Image: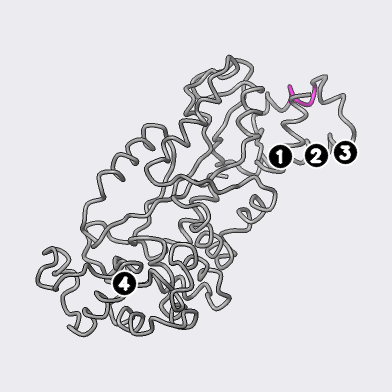
């Protein structure tokens, strides 16, 4: 029954490969195979044929009767595969608008992701920044039973996306981010640190201009920043309330060239309140990613300048579609 469930339930979520001639013979001559219906046998035969066409396929999960360092028993494999794949973000409600916008606009990279989401095989989970390890540790505890032969981190099906929180390209990551990265790497959890400051910095300026009725002076001043300055500007809070000459030296160098008038606007105003103070930034700004005026080219253009940066770690011009490809490979 377990083997039947593995083949006929999880095959809708995952690709199974069997391309060893001896293993194929064992399968086709097994009592289990002989007990299947003709339709089920036909499905098995089609999987075998398909497997033979994928000569370079590398298995991520190998199932054997006796578990070894990199394999699972059948009961273990079922427990592992029945989990949804979860993307942990720092604010699940707000950050989901950004991810859904990418999925909506990069159709070529997201066909599989859309299917997984619709079946609830892929879900977003709230991590709250520094609490991400607590979320993962709670899941690890669920794999402490006698059935599980591996370290609990082996069974995790997570991907973590976090803001860089950097104020300029060459700024070191905050210590809290460094500690989080070490935790994720120690637990073999794949992750992505966004190259811009926050998810808000990926919203095209043209959408701000069209969708926000007030704060236009702020938006016009923001639009006059160069593309890399826009990447690291604090859209919610604006500049610190101090004279330009009193800013941190790195910030002064990074924002050199900004006019006194624009600095004054970006210092005195911010987008904490939108549309006359009726809307709260944290809850309403992310919804701008739902705008039907956003398209794929706009999003690509948000990263088109990335190779022009002088940062020690050059940006990825295709950061957004590559992020989706990274997710797709993990499903």
Separation of marks 1 and 2 at Cα, in angstroms:
10 Å
Q: Which residue sits at x=11%, y=64%?
A: 249
Separation of marks 4 and 1 at Cα, in angstroms:
45 Å
Q: Which residue sits at x=66%, y=22%?
A: 75
Tell me residue 318's x, y (percent): 42, 64
- Say whether marks 3 and 1 touch (CB < 8 Å): no
Asked whether, in this view, residue 288 is left or right of residue 79, the answer is left
Q: Answer above or below: position of 134 versus 224.
A: above
Q: Which residue sits at x=27%, y=71%?
A: 229
Of mark 3 and mark 1, the one earlier in the sequence is 1
Separation of marks 3 and 1 at Cα, in angstroms:
15 Å
- Say whether marks 4 and 1 touch (CB < 8 Å): no
Question: Label 3, on which residue?
Answer: 39
Image quarter where the N terminus lies is top right
Separation of marks 3 and 4 at Cα, in angstroms:
58 Å
Residue depth check, mark 4 versus mark 1: number of the one nearer the observer: 4
Q: How many marks?
A: 4
């Amino acid at each position: 029954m377990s083997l039947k469930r593995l083949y006929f339930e999880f095959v809708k979520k995952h690709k199974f490969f069997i391309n060893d001639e001896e293993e194929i013979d064992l399968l086709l001559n097994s009592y289990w195979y002989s007990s299947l219906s003709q339709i089920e046998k036909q499905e098995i035969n089609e999987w075998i044929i398909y497997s033979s066409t994928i000569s370079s396929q590398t298995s991520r999960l190998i199932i054997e009767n006796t578990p070894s360092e990199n394999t699972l028993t059948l009961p273990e494999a079922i427990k592992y595969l029945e989990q949804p794949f979860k993307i942990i973000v720092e604010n699940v409600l707000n950050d989901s608008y950004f991810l859904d916008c990418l999925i909506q606009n990069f159709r070529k990279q997201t066909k599989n992701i859309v299917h997984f989401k619709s079946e609830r095989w892929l879900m977003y989970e709230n991590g709250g920044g520094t609490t991400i390890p607590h979320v993962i540790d709670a899941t690890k505890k669920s794999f402490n039973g006698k059935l599980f032969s591996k370290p609990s981190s082996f069974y995790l099906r997570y991907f973590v996306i976090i803001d860089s929180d950097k104020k300029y390209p060459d700024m070191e990551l905050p210590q809290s981010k460094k500690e989080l990265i070490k935790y994720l790497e120690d637990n073999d959890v794949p992750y992505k640190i966004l190259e811009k400051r926050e998810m808000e910095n990926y919203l095209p300026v043209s959408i701000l201009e069209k969708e926000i009725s007030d704060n236009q002076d702020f938006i016009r001043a923001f639009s006059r920043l160069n593309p890399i300055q826009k990447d690291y500007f604090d859209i919610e809070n604006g500049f610190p309330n101090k004279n330009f000459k009193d800013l941190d030296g790195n910030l002064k160098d990074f924002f050199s060239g900004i006019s006194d008038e624009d600095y004054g606007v970006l210092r005195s105003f911010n987008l904490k309140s939108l549309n006359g103070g009726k809307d709260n930034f944290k809850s309403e700004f992310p919804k701008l990613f739902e705008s039907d005026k956003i398209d794929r080219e706009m999003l690509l253009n948000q990263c088109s300048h990335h190779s022009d940066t002088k940062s020690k770690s050059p940006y990825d011009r295709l950061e957004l579609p590559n992020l989706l490809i990274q997710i797709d490979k993990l499903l």
